[in-house]
Amino acid sequence: MSDALSPVTDSHAFARAKQIISDLAEFLGVGVQVLPQPVACQASWIQGNCDDRTEAARAWTRLRRMREKLLGPDLFADPAWDMLLDLYVEYKAGRSPSVSSLCLASHVPVTTALRWITKLEHDGLITRSHDPKDGRRIYVHLAPATIEKLDRVIDGFIGSNPTMHASFPSPWKE
């Protein structure tokens, strides 16, 4: 499987994902606005780094927010996973978020998010680096082994890895 998709293939995948999200929202009786294909991903086609995994990670994050909206944020709080998904999307876009940005992505209080960042770093899943231009800012990065593991998890999520979740329905592929 190629990491980079053509705009036609990715547009088709986006259209299918958009339809599935709309159908799910209608079934659940909630209003959801599905925006046109993200401009960031369209620009990424030119650079060749917009792929199924990135779109799946974004979709997974959107579905988590929808679940929180419907069932409440306290029932399914998982700040470590929210942080890892955010870091993955940022990595795929060639960016490293700051600690404060990652705290926002976790959807929990800052003190809780900081504890999770410390745990993720202690467990070797992420690393931190100081901004050479601003000593107050610290960037967070996925460890290389974590990127590989997230690739495998997301492959299972989209059904492109036959050894993981082979029966998982894939809205991103024909």
Image: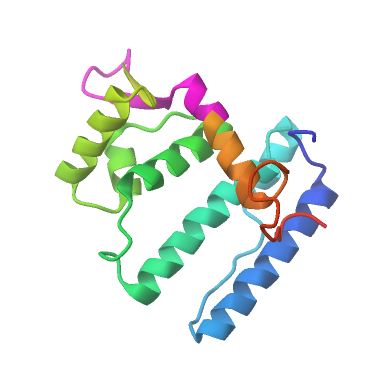
- Residue 173 visible? The answer is yes
Dividing the image into 4 quarters, which one contains the C terminus?
A: bottom right
Q: Position of residue 109 (x, y in %)?
A: 19, 50
Q: Position of residue 7 (x, y in %)?
A: 80, 47
Q: Which residue corresponds to the image point at 33% horizontal and 61% vertical from the top-left?
A: 76
Q: Which residue corresponds to the image point at 65% horizontal and 63% vertical from the top-left?
A: 36
What's drawn in magenta, residue-wise? 131-148
Displayed quadrant of residue 41 = top right
Left or right of residue 161, residue 59 in this image:
left
Left or right of residue 19, residue 85 in this image:
left
Dividing the image into 4 quarters, which one contains the N terminus?
A: top right
Q: Which residue corresponds to the image point at 29% horizontal and 66% vertical from the top-left?
A: 75
Q: Which residue corresponds to the image point at 61% horizontal and 50% vertical from the top-left?
A: 157
Displayed quadrant of residue 135 = top left
Taking depth in this image into account, of 102 and 80 the one nearest to the observer is: 80
Taking depth in this image into account, of 74 and 62 the one nearest to the observer is: 74
Against 153, residue 95 (above or below) is above
- As drawn, the residue found furthest toward the top would be 132
- Residue 94 visible? The answer is no
Left or right of residue 17, residue 26 in this image:
left
Q: Position of residue 146 (x, y in %)?
A: 48, 28
Q: Position of residue 15 (x, y in %)?
A: 74, 64
Q: Is residue 144 magenta?
A: yes
Against 16, residue 161 (above or below) is above
Against 47, residue 68 (above or below) is below
Taking depth in this image into account, of 91 and 40 the one nearest to the observer is: 91
Q: Is residue 173 magenta?
A: no
